[in-house]
Image (cartoon, rainbow, N blue to C red):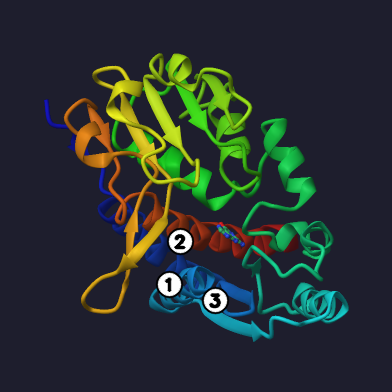
Amino acid sequence: MSARIISGTAIAFQIREEIRQEVIELKAQHGIEPGLVTIIVGKNPASISYVTAKQKTAKELGFYSVQEDMPEDISETALLEMIGKYNKDPKIHGILVQLPLPKQVNETKILYAIDPDKDVDGFHPVNVGKLMIGEARFYPCTPYGIQQLLMRSNVQIDGAEVVVVGRSNIVGKPISMMLAQKAKGANATVTMCHTGTRDLTFHTKRADILIVAAGRPKAITADMVKEGVVIIDVGVNRIGMTPEGKAKLCGDVDFEALKEKAAAITPVPGGVGPMTITMLMLNTVKAAKYTVSSKQ
Ligand code: GUN
């Protein structure tokens, strides 16, 4: 068997066209341009590449977008002041602080400082709590993208055995919570595995849907899954350079071996990555729309 390749690039394109339409309507009916500020601290190449892609997409979709490049040695106070400024700026509907942050800055304190109504990453504890009780306004972008990939590829989620490998606040925990909700595109039985899991293969072999955010190449090999599994590979590992000088990427699963065993699989690049960026745009439009509905 050769797996169906789930193209994040194609599905993200489709969603971006829907967003483009919404942006036109928001402008025509309410005179509002969705506004997004991305704040990056330091020169981490992965962070720069993500934020550049986010800004490019925002511009392409007709957003008002601002990028703040801050030095690696920025003080926590200066970063908090900047967030305070954008919390008050009516042209900005979404604030994104790219993670990770340098050591002198307390990440939790920064995430708390963002107005929850502008928290398009869905990382503020208020939004994390709302997600937990099934009342989320903003789903974190990567989990939201994963759920859309599954739904738009007609993968049966309701009743499925979903195994998530990884328990990060950005991916593992929120996707586990989202897919376990009693809701459309969810209602699955979810198992969350992590570095403390005693027998990883015992769990991964049971998965109908396997979501891997382990942060390590080939963390999942063909002997660890059952025939016909659907695999979502969230990994982005940089493994050298292409001849064009671009970073060469690979995911967290042994793609070549697994595509012979899986029913469907996402590639890296071109799987989850483009979806994450697109869901950020969707969250920013949601945030902009919210300012309209809260005024009415
Ligand atoms: N670093 C890695 N992924 C993300 C993300 O989705 N949002 C932010 N802000 N930082 C990240």
Quarter of the rendered structure image containing ligand 1: bottom right
Q: Residue at x 52, y 60 (%)?
A: 280
Of tags 1 and 3, the one toward the viewer is: 1
| Residue furthest right as drawn | 77
Is residue 91 among the parts visible in the rendering? Answer: yes
Give amino acid for label 1: Ala
Give amino acid for label 3: Glu
At numbered mark 3, what does the secondary structure look like: helix, strand or loop?
loop
Q: Which residue is mark 2?
A: 277
Q: Residue at x 78, y 74 (%)?
A: 83
Find residue 53 and name its label. 1
Mark 1 to mark 2: distance in Å?
A: 7 Å
At numbered mark 1, what does the secondary structure look like: helix, strand or loop?
helix
Question: Which is more N-terminal, label 2 or label 3?
Answer: 3
Q: Residue at x 62, y 57 (%)?
A: 121
Counting other residues with Cα less than 10 Å from the Cα at mark 3, is it few (<14), some (14-19), or many (20 or more)? many
Of tags 3 and 2, the one toward the viewer is: 2
Q: Which residue is mark 3?
A: 33
Find residue 28 and name its label. none
Of residues 180 and 238, the one nearer the viewer is: 238
Residue 70 location (% of width, % of height): 68, 84
At numbered mark 2, what does the secondary structure look like: helix, strand or loop?
helix
Image height of 67 relative to 165, above or below? below
Quarter residue 243 falls in:
bottom left
Is residue 296 among the parts visible in the rendering? Answer: no
Question: Which is more N-terminal, label 2 or label 1?
Answer: 1
Mark 1 to mark 3: distance in Å?
A: 19 Å
Image height of 43 relative to 296, above or below? below
Q: Is mark 1 within 8 Å of ligand 1?
A: no
Quarter residue 178 falls in:
top right
Q: Quadrant of the N terminus?
A: top left
Confirm or deny contact between disc 1 and disc 2 (CB under 8 A). yes
